[in-house]
Amino acid sequence: MTATIPRTRITVRERASTIVCAETRTAVVDRRPAVSVRVPRQVRITTGQQGPRGRSGAAGSGFDFTQPTAATVWTINHNLGLRPDVATYRLGGTEMKGAVQHLSDNTLTVTFNSPVAGYARVS
């Protein structure tokens, strides 16, 4: 079974806000109309001032943590001032999953089902 939806025509008019118009489209299955999708005739998108510049994404920004002895809970003080992503690995380099809890913008814990030693990349 194949379904095709014809390309939708979109009209954009520039003003203080942008109006986008679209049409109703019908999916065709085995040469018969099957599903009709109605898109709102007009969607108003308003724009405002640009927000403040974000933090630098410079290469090497992050924190490497090592847990040399096996533990069920790792407490990581990274001092990055944000709630970063965390990847955890066994000492042999195999990635493993743990439950991450951000205690603050500078400290987090990772909890595992059983005691494990390894390292974490926080970025």
Image (cartoon, grey):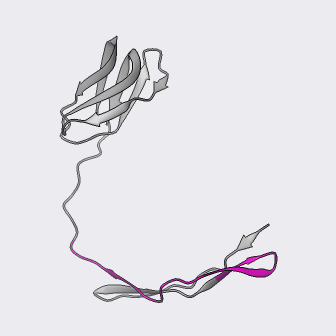
Q: Which residues are magenta?
A: 26-49
Q: Is residue 47 magenta?
A: yes
Residue 100, magenta (yes or no): no
Give the quarter of the figure containing the N terminus: bottom right
Name the spot of residue 30 as percent of width and height, x first: 81, 75
Q: Residue at x 29, y 35 (%)?
A: 101
Q: Position of residue 48 (x, y in %)?
A: 23, 76
Left or right placement of residue 99 versus residue 63 in this view: right
Image point 22% across, 30% down: which residue?
78
Q: Is residue 29 above or below residue 18?
A: above
Q: Nearer the viewer, residue 114 or 66?
A: 114
Q: At 47% across and 20% down in the image, what residue appears?
A: 93
Q: Is residue 55 left or right of residue 31?
A: left
- 40 and 61: which is toward the camera: 40
Q: Relative to the observer, which residue lies in front, 56 or 38?
A: 38
Provide residue 106's location: percent of width, then percent of height: 18, 35
